[in-house]
Amino acid sequence: MKKYGVILNDALLILLGAMLQAASLRLFLVPANLASGGVSGISQLINHFTGWPIGLMILVGNLPLFVLGWRFLGGRRFLLRTVLAILIYSLFIDLLPTLPLFQNGGAASTLILDLQGDLLLNALYGAILSGIGYGLVYRARGTSGGSDILARILNHWRGIPMTQSYLIVDTVVILAAGFVFGWKEALYAMIALYVSGLVAETTLEGGSTIRTAMIVTDQAEAVAQRVLDDLERGVTVLQGKGAFSGGEKPVLYCVISRAEVSQLKTIVRELDPDAFVVIGVAHEALGEGFRPLKNQ
């Protein structure tokens, strides 16, 4: 029963995410001649010259990429989720312009007219909407096809962050669009691409960025105890050795919230002003004191 609940939840996320992506393309990107990158961007360019349906071309263009996704991203489960996302995305891209909401005088067409000519607003609205859509599809362990498949492969195979993966696989398409739509449009398309990646990551991983801290100090026991008592955070004691001095010294490692960084630095400064502290950024922490691992 729980398994079917997970499947239904993933299907709903994919449905909503794909619809948001389609709305982003039709409401903001296509009217402003902003290429979305990947297969969708190529389809926009072909549509500009031929008038062929964008959704249909996206569906056809993704067929060879399914093979790569099958190989690198989970076989049958990947294929089913991605096919669902692509079908919904492609269908709604070609269906939305035919709805009364998009006809002359409709709310959506009025919004398009209000933003027409303002490339920045179209880029930002389109990026935010598509980024949320991408993130929802990713949360459901699917992809939206096209450059999403290649981005997920880079992320899975090489550990490249999603934002950079988007830039790598989509930049060529957007540069090509610069020759067709103009270089100002290409610049705003790049902005939309970058913002979309950031929004997708936030939607996928959540906005609660946490901090990691490594502390090299002669007062390791005192610092660790204060962190345990004042911050109520766990501390791991690692054994370190200085490459230059050759001396052994304990290294404290702990994970804290962003708001606790200042308090941690105060604790270390009071107990050992000569300590060496490194504060890092982590996107997610699972386990005691944070989100339960068993629910992931």
Image (cartoon, helix red, strand yellow):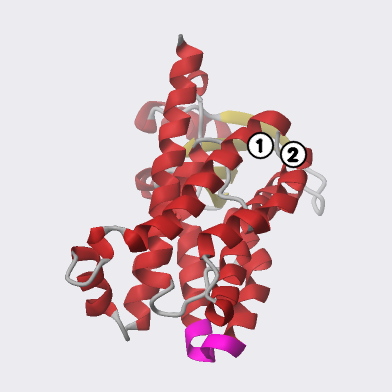
- Mark 2 highlights which residue? 70
- Mark 1 highlights which residue? 79
Q: Nearer the viewer, residue 115 or 128?
A: 115
* Element marked by disc 1: helix
Spatial CA distance of label 2 from label 1 is 6 Å
Q: Earlier in the sequence, mark 2 or mark 1?
A: 2
The answer, for residue 212, to whether it is visible in the render is no
Mark 2 Cα-neighbour bin, 10 Å: few <14, some 14–19, many ≥20:
some
Q: Residue at x 39, y 65 (%)?
A: 26
Mark 1 Cα-neighbour bin, 10 Å: few <14, some 14–19, many ≥20:
many
Whether 27 is drawn above or below 33: the answer is above
**x, y percentage for residue 236?**
59, 29
State the image quarter where residue 167 is shown: bottom right
* Element marked by disc 2: helix
Q: Residue at x 42, y 71 (%)?
A: 29
Verify CB contact (< 8 Å) between mark 2 and mark 1. Answer: yes
**x, y percentage for residue 102?**
27, 64
Instruction: Look at the image and say whether residue 2 sits in the magenta stretch.
Output: no
Looking at the rendering, the stretch of residues picked out in magenta corresponds to 179-186
**x, y percentage for residue 198?**
47, 59
Whether 13 is drawn above or below 7: the answer is below
Q: Amino acid at mark 2?
A: Trp
**x, y percentage for residue 169?**
67, 64
